[in-house]
């Protein structure tokens, strides 16, 4: 992450140099001030680029490390993983007929039965 920040800083410095150089052309009266900014920006840009280069030396890019590893062990020589033998578990017997709930069809009560129901609660 830090490497990317220093790369971004170097890019910002490059853009700042362009602005400072343009400012000297547009406002030559303050050229001395702009020259100081240019000197500072060039130093920051050099330092940022040096840090980025140091990251490459100390921590090589991941793509380079994977290439080195793949060159060490060709694909043909890589050990293959052995599959584990599956243990058979006792199977639960399955009925040939699907289980169904046998329910009696619902018969609506007759009017007389409804009357008896309500009589039970009283008037």
Image (cartoon, rainbow, N blue to C red):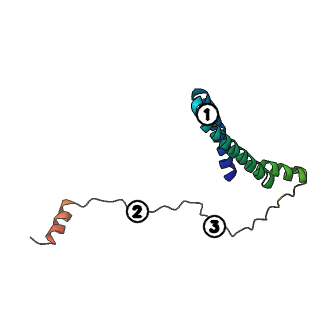
**Residue depicted at 77% across the width and 48% down the height:** 53
Quadrant in the picture for the C terminus: bottom left
Residue placed under numbered mark 2 in the picture: 103
**Residue depicted at 77% across the width and 52% down the height:** 54
Which residue occupies the foreground of this view, 106 or 4? Answer: 4
Q: Is residue 69 left or right of residue 10?
A: right
Q: Secondary structure at mark 2?
A: loop
**How far across and how far down the image is residue 41, in percent?**
66, 42
Is label 2 in contact with label 3 (beta carbons under 8 Å)? no
Q: Secondary structure at mark 1?
A: helix
**How far across and how far down the image is residue 37, in percent?**
63, 40
Residue placed under numbered mark 1 in the picture: 31
Residue 121, numbered circle: none
Q: Is residue 118 left or right of residue 93?
A: left
Of the image marks 2 and 3, the number of the one nearer the N terminus: 3
Residue 93, numbered circle: 3
Which residue occupies the foreground of this view, 110 or 55? Answer: 55
Estimate the spatial distance between the alpha carbons at disc 2 and disc 1, rounded to whole Å.
Answer: 99 Å
- Nearest-to-viewer mark from 2 and 3: 3
Estimate the spatial distance between the alpha carbons at disc 2 and disc 3, rounded to whole Å.
Answer: 25 Å
- Nearest-to-viewer mark from 2 and 1: 1
Question: Is residue 61 at all visible to an observer of this figure?
Answer: no
Local crowd at mark 3 within 10 Å, few (<14), some, or many (≥20)? few
**Residue depicted at 69% across the width and 41% down the height:** 42
Of the image marks 3 and 1, the number of the one nearer the N terminus: 1
Question: Is residue 13 at all visible to an observer of this figure?
Answer: yes
**Residue depicted at 66% across the width and 38% down the height:** 14
Image vertical order of residue 62 relative to residue 102, above or below: above
**How far across and how far down the image is residue 29, in percent?**
57, 31
Q: Is residue 2 left or right of residue 60?
A: left
């Amino acid at each position: 992450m830090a490497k990317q920040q220093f790369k971004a800083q170097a890019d910002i410095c490059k853009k700042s140099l362009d602005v400072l150089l343009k400012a000297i052309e547009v406002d030559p009266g303050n050229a001395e001030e702009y020259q100081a900014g240019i000197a500072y920006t060039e130093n920051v840009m050099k330092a940022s680029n040096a840090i980025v280069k140091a990251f490459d030396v100390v921590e090589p890019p991941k793509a380079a490390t994977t290439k080195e590893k793949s060159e060490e062990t060709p694909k043909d020589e890589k050990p293959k993983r052995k599959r584990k033998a599956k243990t058979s578990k006792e199977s639960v017997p399955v009925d040939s007929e699907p289980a169904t709930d046998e329910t009696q069809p619902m018969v609506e009560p007759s009017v007389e039965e409804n009357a008896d129901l309500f009589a039970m609660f009283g008037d």
